[in-house]
Amino acid sequence: MFNQTRAAIIAIVLIIPLSTIAMWNSTRFQEFTETSVENQKIVALASFYPLYEFTKEVGKDKVDVSLLVPPGIEPHDWEPSIQDLQRIQQADIIIINGIGFENWFKDIEKLNSELTIIDSSNGINIIKEVNSDQHKDSHLDASLADPHIWLNPSLAKIQVKNIAESLIELDPDNSLYYHDNSENYIKKLDVLDSKIRNELSNCSKDFVAFHNAFIYFAKEYGLNQHTIVSNEPHGEPTSKTLEKIINLAKEMKIQVIFTEEGVDKRTSEVIAKELGGKALTLSPLEISETNTSYIEKMEANLVNLKEALCN
Ligand SMILES: [Zn+2]
């Protein structure tokens, strides 16, 4: 290894703290948590942003959905506060990703026996295999199941269908409404899916993400994911993993190193500099943003993936 590479690795390991960038914004959070006074609406809680949006798209005027993990907060380490537990007690339904993503979920059922729990991962084939550079994630359960299903639009469609089916069961009088809304949103997800498939079809396949969130995405589009940190986003890269990723990127002539929201971007930037390339964002859509939709975020990921893979 070149001395320069070693210096870059030491800089990352010793100097850069991988702390969360708290992007808490109370005004924005309020928009997400305002509760309607209309009692007729189903009161729904969604565990994190993609599920909030899917539920909003299906439920529209009939469902009063709010977000449990607030915008700007990484859902991996989140724990409900007393206020959150009260909100859970008052809700009709709670929508979770499932597959062990919601670590905090274990005792929720005891809080509210009336609560309908929608596990949006129902019916999805869970990936349990991890390859050499996709080590187990902190939010994987004991079976090493990977929870990042929402990043594959084909699986997001199943999540939307699961949400629609549960709303129909809960409120059968409006079944046509939920059905039509879900079909309309699924059409948009189909367009997104075709766009990703077409635009990445003739490009190279190997990319370096920050944490291992893109296994389902990579599998769907025939790509290979490599990662900087071998576990959760806040895990620190070791000198060994950094050395490995720099060598692998050099070997594969990878020029773009991805970073993500809520982590120190300098980690990816230092690696990219070492390769003579650059760092771009590939969002796992785990930290919520109020002003960008799921589809817009996925399209932004596509633009950056094209820059990484299609040049
Ligand atoms: Zn993750």
Image (cartoon, grey):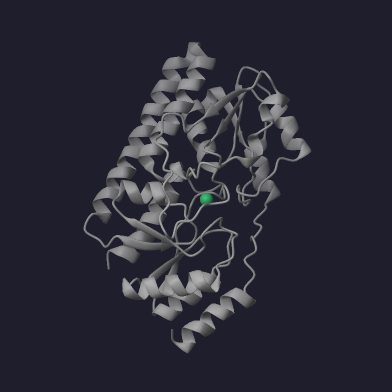
Quadrant where the N terminus sits is: bottom left
Compared with residue 55, is residue 224 higher up or lower down, i.e. above or below? below
Quadrant where the C terminus sits is: bottom left
Residue most extreme to the bottom: 3
Residue placed at 44% from the left, 71% from the top?
244
Q: Nearer the viewer, residue 302 or 82?
A: 82
Q: Is residue 192 left or right of residue 7?
A: left
Q: Nearer the viewer, residue 60 or 208?
A: 208
Residue placed at 33% from the left, 62% from the top?
206
Residue placed at 40% from the left, 78% from the top?
275
Task: Name the spot of residue 152 as percent of width and height, x first.
Answer: 39, 44
Task: Name the spot of residue 136 as percent of width and height, x first.
Answer: 51, 52
Task: Name the spot of residue 63 as percent of width and height, x first.
Answer: 56, 25
Compared with residue 276, is residue 147 higher up or lower down, i.e. above or below? above
Q: Is residue 22 left or right of residue 134?
A: right
Residue most extreme to the left: 202
Residue most extreme to the right: 82
Residue placed at 65% from the left, 63% from the top?
19
Q: Is residue 25 left or right of residue 161?
A: right
Compared with residue 112, is residue 249 higher up or lower down, i.e. above or below? below
Q: Residue 21: name its quadrant.
A: bottom right
